[in-house]
Amino acid sequence: MKLEILNAMSEQEIIEALGTRKEKIEIARKLKELKLPHKKSEKYRYYDIESFLHKEITLPKSGFEAKEHKNALIIENAKVIAIPKQEGVEVTFKEFSDVASNHFDSLYYLSHLLNQKAIVIRISKDSNFEIKHIVSSNEFLSYRIVLFVDSNVKAKVYESFEYCGDNLDRLLYGIDAIIARDASLDFIKNQTLNFSVEPIATNYFKLDSNATCNFLTFDFTSKSGLNIFKAELKEHAHFDATHLIYGTNSAKIGTISEIEHTEKSAKSNQDARAILNEKARGIFDALIRVTKEGIYASAHQNSKAILLNSGAYMASKPQLEIYIDDLEASHGSTTGQLDKTQLFYLRSRGINEVEARKMLILAFANSAISKIEDETIFNRVQIDFEKAYYGDTKLDCIKTCHECEENILKG
Amino acid sequence: MSKILEIKNLKAKIGNKEILKGLNLDLEEGKVHAIMGPNGAGKSTLSKAIVGHFDVEVTDGEILYKGKNIVDWEPEERALEGIFLSFQHPVEIPGVNNAYFLRTAVNAKRKHEGKEELNAAEFLRKMRSLANELGLKPELLNRSLNEGFSGGEKKRNEVLQMMMLEPNLVILDEIDSGLDIDALRAVSEGINKMKDGKRSFLVITHYSRILDYIKPDYIHVLKDGKIVKTAGAELVKELEEKGYSEFEEK
Ligand SMILES: Nc1ncnc2c1ncn2[C@@H]1O[C@H](COP(=O)(O)OP(=O)(O)O)[C@@H](O)[C@H]1O
Ligand SMILES: [Mg+2]
């Protein structure tokens, strides 16, 4: 079937068409109310969402056949094949209907309807593990993950992707992270899928009072993909989001988000950086809303893009929607080339132009990557960035990049 | 006496404005030349023209460095061949580590000269000891290049780069601006230590104080885009007394 037919259906018909449990009627209602996006939908205007939705899909089947694994939850083609063996991390596969009631994104509701069950992870002790997505199927894949971080617990999750097929269609997945009082979640996504995969993540972060969430996304790719998320902040909650994209070819990548301060004294900070080459298009459509109840808020948002090529384009739309007076807020957006004066300074010391550009681009990327506290993950992301960045400039970087040098020598 | 730099009838524009209007200047190997002149005379423009800054468009004339016209050379070629400019306003580069940058530059130059790269330990030892001589706080070596440095720290960092890169022609554009007396003394000592009878210096200033510390062999007066007078060190006194208005084009 084609997903677009859902737009014309009633809630009951949607539920029947997707073979969903009746309890999900509220979710179907939300989907019907929001409607699936099309090319004129404001938020998806710069993304080729129609090609994502208009292709035929078979209803996805998620599953659970887990064997224990030391430190990772591994999901291969929508099936959980390993779970982390850690005290205080419990993984189950079960029905889940308690979703966000006011998410802006219809794909969020769609993915909840497509999935009868969700992978539910309850974190009751300080822990640190990886969620690894392996994709090799040539079908449309969809699944949902729910993360409960209990009160006073510090959780660190590193999300990675591995592709080992040649013909993956699309991946529509997402995480509902419910972060209890005084708990904290560090969530790092590192996505460098470079084949035919098009991952769309549609997430929801709910921060109870005094909870903290650091959400970092790294997408280095020649293909398209989106980070869609909604975050809700209660009293004294603190949400910090950092996004770095490096896009080449005709990738369309970026962030569509909404962060909402629903109670007093919450803090949010969102820093988006983009490096775009060839015909890549970066997207940053991000709203921070401070409601009437959100007094004493601190809300900051910034987007910076470097275009390495005249064909590259950044669609940046940072927005603050504020219903109170007493707050500290800022937002800004810049798009441009590398700074000529900086480039000249490096060259005037004998560093050739290719190397000087490399230093400045790495510096720009590092200002996001250096927010990763864990050294191993920091190194991994940094290496992934360099790989992505040199992947398309091999010949120029032969003198400076050992990996490329070796690859070229190998033939 | 052999000349390291010969500038002949140099005309240069910034934007649409002609700043250098047929400038002639010869610099001798192993000597200290000072260029003095009022604000806006074109001193920084001249230094930028020599290093190939993108702001400056050379429209006529020649810049011969060791006998070769370098007007069309890339900035990095000029640097690798031994030209160094200490900038009047060094730029801040967040995210580029100061020591890493300097090591990259030093090794690029060594490679160009057919020498082996300095290993990390040799490099660090040399850099730290020179930074210490210049009174540059060691923690600044591990910070982002010039980011948040005070005016004086930036100038010391420029001189550190000069001392590490060991150029043949050193151009110092207003090296004393932003320096207090102690800093001026430390920086001048560093510069004087680099005099070896072969290396040439072009000290650009609109204020004679620096010339008490770095003794010039020649003084040139730059006014309205041209060198209007060349004399020995005794000219400094005269300039201090009379100012620049006395000097008109010959
Ligand atoms: N980037 C620039 N854009 C436009 N005009 C400039 C620029 N830099 C310098 N100028 C102008 O060129 C002239 C010479 O400047 P400069 O060489 O900096 O003088 P000096 O160093 O002798 O004080 C001045 O009139 C100055 O205003
Ligand atoms: Mg000047």
Image (cartoon, coloured by chain):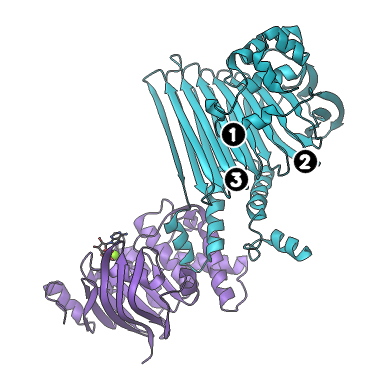
Residue A305 relative to residue B150: left or right: right
Which residue lies under the disc numbered 2? A163
Asked if marks 3 and 2 touch (Cβ < 8 Å), the reply is no
Relative to residue A170, is residue B206 depicted above or below? below
Colour cyan maps to chain:
A
Could you tell me the amino acid type at mark 3? Answer: Tyr
Task: Tell me which chain the residue with mark 2 is part of.
Answer: A
Relative to residue A368, is residue A14 depicted above or below? above
Label 1 crowd bin: few (<14), some (14–19), many (20+), radius 10 Å: many
Q: Nearer the viewer, residue A209 or A177?
A: A177
Q: Which mark is residue A246?
A: 3
Dot 1 lies on which element? loop
Could you tell me the amino acid type at mark 2? Answer: Tyr
Q: Which mark is residue A47?
A: 1
Which one is earlier in the sequence, the residue at label 3 or at label 2? 2
Colour purple maps to chain:
B
In 3D space, how far apart are the residues under numbered discs 3 and 2 (Cα atoms)?
18 Å
In front: mark 1 or mark 3?
1
In 3D space, how far apart are the residues under numbered discs 1 and 3 (Cα atoms)?
16 Å
Quarter occupied by the C terminus of chain B: bottom left
Task: Tell me which chain the residue with mark 1 is part of.
Answer: A
In 3D space, how far apart are the residues under numbered discs 1 and 2 (Cα atoms)?
22 Å
